[in-house]
Image (cartoon, grey):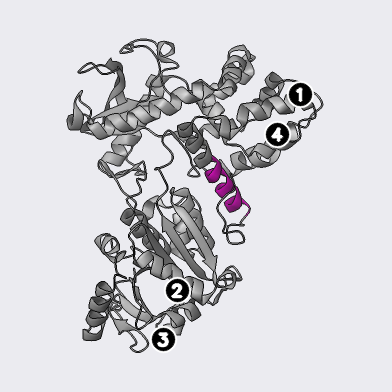
């Protein structure tokens, strides 16, 4: 006969040094801090306060809570139709299974915040001071446009456990105490602690990295990035692709044979890893058919319009003309390799997107019970005098269940209807290989091309890829991809905990 394990129900908060938020003293501290204007950041944080879903997910829960508090749009679905940051979506710098087993380091939480599109300022205690930390707490406690996540060791507060992450929810200036919104709510409630003691708790070396712990300020970017493209490390080939782009390409262009732009493209594309299409993705708008019919909400129309503008700006660059010309004239071997990596047939792509969209909308993404697309119809809609909108409707099935899915596609071409037509008749009306490859080349660091030996060609390449020459929307898109590439490269080299700075772009 098996005996049931009783387990643990919470812990008693050691007090002192901490003061329970719900205690009489904690309530008085809260009231006084409100009166002094140092609880402004609290209201948004408490609106999105969450409990970590796994014992080792404190870093992920803290970050998801802060990102949602700042109303940063993840640009992709969580469950059903909802775009929302969840711990399960924060996996671009460390596999979730590894986090679940071992937790996550300070540098990788910083990496995740950058990858999610937030503005991040990160400091280890040996790179900052107690006075600086106190000033940052005051800054974020008197406004709601930034929040602090602290990485500290629980032992300093006489608490059980070791390293931990949690957001700081407010500040009492008179008592010099910070409110920790502990995301391990199954263990300890929110509590006030002396700032000097919190600094001491952060000023511990993490045995996993040999680095000091610290704190990070997280705030909104000027605009949610990743309008049209994003980099993905979900496919196992991402390490190979990132290494090729960052390490191999700079060496390939040093060849004496590289005499013109066509040859540059040839040496880069001919050795491109076969699965590069799994590395860079275009961000699709997916919805249930019954949620929208043939009408778009103002929000959907606005996002689609921005995507189309980014696509248009890519296609107007000088580099796109070279890439498009190269792909048109490339030998069949090279062209077929690129096509197999990033399929140009919209119906085929739409069928895959409809299936993935159906999995997301029904909360079954990654499930063994996969959807298959029975039919797709590509059409151009025009309503109320607006410009045409490309819509892909798909019917997907999973066993006996059936779901209608719509994919809104950014488009720069003339109105067309591809229902029942051949795949080739739809090529070019959505982000295809020439667009994706152009974006990828623009996102490479400028020093990628510095090894080109022909001075005239080097100048020409710099003029084609110079970020400041691009329109503002495209600049932001390219810089976001470049930051992602930089961060993924640091992950691949296991250096995210050595360099906390934002990628220089």
Q: What secondary structure is marked by label 2?
A: helix
Q: Magenta segment: does it hold 489?
A: yes
Question: Where in the figure is residue 365, as x and y percent of width and height?
Answer: 34, 43
Instruction: Assess disc 1: are there few (<14), some (14-19) or many (≥20) residues with their C-alpha within 10 Å of its C-alpha.
Output: few
Residue interval drawn in magenta: 482-493
Instruction: Assess disc 4: are there few (<14), some (14-19) or many (≥20) residues with their C-alpha within 10 Å of its C-alpha.
Output: many
Would residue 9 be found to the left or right of residue 274 on screen? Answer: left
Pick whichever, 423 or 74, lies toward us: 74
Q: Looking at the image, is 196 positioned above or below residue 220?
A: below
The residue beneath circle 2 is 134
Name the quadrant containing residue 427: top left
Q: Specify which label sits upstream in the sequence, 4 or 2.
A: 2
The residue beneath circle 1 is 456
**4 or 2: mark nearer the eye:** 2
Question: Where in the figure is residue 92, as x and y percent of width and height?
Answer: 48, 49
Give the residue drawn at x 61%, y 56%.
494
Question: Where in the figure is residue 500, as x and y percent of width and height?
Answer: 57, 59
**2 or 3: mark nearer the eye:** 2
Name the quadrant containing residue 419: top left
């Amino acid at each position: 006969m098996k005996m049931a394990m009783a387990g643990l129900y919470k812990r008693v908060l050691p007090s002192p040094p901490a003061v329970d938020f719900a205690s009489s003293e904690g309530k008085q501290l809260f009231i006084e801090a409100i009166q002094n204007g140092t609880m402004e950041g609290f209201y948004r944080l408490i609106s999105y306060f969450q409990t970590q879903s796994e014992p080792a997910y404190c870093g992920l829960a803290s970050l998801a809570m802060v990102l949602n508090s700042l109303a940063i749009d993840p640009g992709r679905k969580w469950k059903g139709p909802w775009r929302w940051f969840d711990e399960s979506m924060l996996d671009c710098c460390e596999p979730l299974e590894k986090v679940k087993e071992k937790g996550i380091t300070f540098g990788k939480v910083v990496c995740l915040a950058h990858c999610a599109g937030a503005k991040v300022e990160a400091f280890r205690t040996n790179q900052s001071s107690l006075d600086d930390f106190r000033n940052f707490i005051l800054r974020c406690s008197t406004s709601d446009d930034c929040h602090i996540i602290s990485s500290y060791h629980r032992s300093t507060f006489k608490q059980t456990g070791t390293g931990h992450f949690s957001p700081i929810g407010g500040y009492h200036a008179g008592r010099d105490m910070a409110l920790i919104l502990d995301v391990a709510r199954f263990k300890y409630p929110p509590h006030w602690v002396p700032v000097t003691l919190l600094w001491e708790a952060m000023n511990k070396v993490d045995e996993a990295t040999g680095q000091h712990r610290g704190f990070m300020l997280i705030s909104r970017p000027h605009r949610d990035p990743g309008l049209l493209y994003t980099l993905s490390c979900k496919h196992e080939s991402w390490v190979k692709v990132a290494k090729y782009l960052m390490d191999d390409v700079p060496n390939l262009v040093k060849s004496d044979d590289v005499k013109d732009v066509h040859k540059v493209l040839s040496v880069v594309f001919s050795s491109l890893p076969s699965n590069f299409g799994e590395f860079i993705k275009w961000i699709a708008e997916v919805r249930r058919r019954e949620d929208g019919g043939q009408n778009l909400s103002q929000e959907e129309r606005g996002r689609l319009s921005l995507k189309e503008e980014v696509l248009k700006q890519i296609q107007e660059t000088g580099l796109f003309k070279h890439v498009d010309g190269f792909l048109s004239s490339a030998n069949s071997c090279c062209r077929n390799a690129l096509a197999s990596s990033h399929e140009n047939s919209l119906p085929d792509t739409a069928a895959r997107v409809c299936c993935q969209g159906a999995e997301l909308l029904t909360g079954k993404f990654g499930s063994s019970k996969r959807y298959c697309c029975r039919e797709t119809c590509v059409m151009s809609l025009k309503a109320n005098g607006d410009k045409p909108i490309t819509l892909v409707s798909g019917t997907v099935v999973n066993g006996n269940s059936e779901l209608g899915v719509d994919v809104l596609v950014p488009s720069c071409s003339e109105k067309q209807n591809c229902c029942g037509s051949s795949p080739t008749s739809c090529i070019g009306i959505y982000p295809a290989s020439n667009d994706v490859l152009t974006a990828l080349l623009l996102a490479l660091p400028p020093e990628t091309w510095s090894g080109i030996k022909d001075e005239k060609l080097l100048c020409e390449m710099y003029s084609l890829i110079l970020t400041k020459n691009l329109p503002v929307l495209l600049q932001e898109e390219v810089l976001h991809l470049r930051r992602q590439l930089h961060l993924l490269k640091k992950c691949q080299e296991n250096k995210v905990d050595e360099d906390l700075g934002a990628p220089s772009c």
